[in-house]
């Protein structure tokens, strides 16, 4: 069973991510975090396999949280899920240790393949339009 932590400050987005992930019987949402500090704490407690992490979060950005999570749990796979333009943000996300970047605009098309890819590969996965 693949354990996934969802991190987004908007309940509607967290709910949408849960619905997408429910398509896979071998994946479970082990928790939800509402900001960067909560993400770091829950990542340490829940030990997820994958973290879906928004960039724009209160208290600590997703990029800052990703750096801390990678220090504390180098084996966790981080997929940035953001509304930011991938041309501007994808390389920054990968620089801080994320394994993939999926725009919220393309979640229904790109999220599940991105998670599959980061679970299979040790390298980075670039998913844009």
Image (cartoon, rainbow, N blue to C red):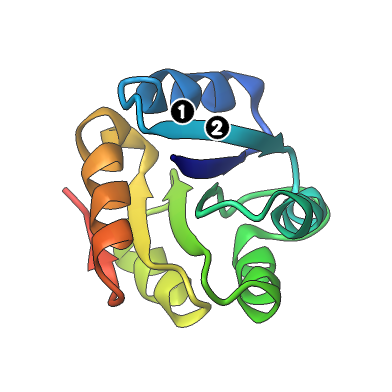
Circle number at residue 17: 1
Which residue of the protein is positioned furthest toward the left in this rendering? 129
Q: Position of residue 80 (x, y in %)?
A: 45, 55
Q: Position of residue 76 (x, y in %)?
A: 53, 65
Q: Position of residue 10 (x, y in %)?
A: 65, 28
Q: Is residue 83 left or right of residue 119?
A: right
Residue at image location 74% in from the left, 38% down from the top: 34
Residue at image location 40% in from the left, 20% down from the top: 22
Which structural element holds mark 1? helix
Give the spatial CA distance, label 2 vs label 1: 9 Å
Quarter of image, res 23: top left
Give 22 or 103, whichever is nearer the viewer.
Answer: 22
Q: Position of residue 38 (x, y in %)?
A: 80, 49
Crowding at mark 2 (Cα within 10 Å: few <14, some 14-19, many 20+): some
Disc 2 designates what residue?
29
Earlier-in-chain disc, 2 versus 1? 1
Mark 2, mark 1: which one is toward the viewer? Answer: 2
Give the vertical position of 12 relative to 106 (above or below).
above
Crowding at mark 1 (Cα within 10 Å: few <14, some 14-19, many 20+): many
Name the quarter where the N terminus is drawn.
Answer: top left
Q: Is residue 63 left or right of residue 111?
A: right
Tag 2 and tag 1, C-beta contact below 8 Å: yes
Which residue of the protein is positioned furthest toward the front in this rendering? 1
Q: Is residue 105 left or right of residue 5?
A: left
Give the vertical position of 37 relative to 13 (above or below).
below
């Amino acid at each position: 069973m693949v354990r996934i932590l969802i991190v987004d400050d908007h309940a509607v987005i967290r709910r949408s991510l849960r619905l997408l992930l429910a398509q896979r019987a071998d994946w479970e949402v082990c928790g939800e975090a509402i900001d960067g500090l909560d993400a770091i704490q829950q990542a340490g407690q829940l030990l997820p396999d994958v973290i879906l992490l928004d960039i724009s979060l209160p208290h600590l950005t997703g990029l800052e949280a990703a750096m801390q999570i990678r220090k504390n749990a180098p084996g966790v796979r981080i997929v940035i899920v953001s509304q930011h333009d991938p041309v501007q943000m994808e390389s920054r996300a990968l620089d801080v240790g994320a394994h993939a970047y999926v725009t919220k605009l393309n979640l229904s098309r790109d999220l599940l393949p991105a998670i599959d890819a980061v679970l299979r590969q040790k390298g980075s996965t670039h998913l844009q339009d």
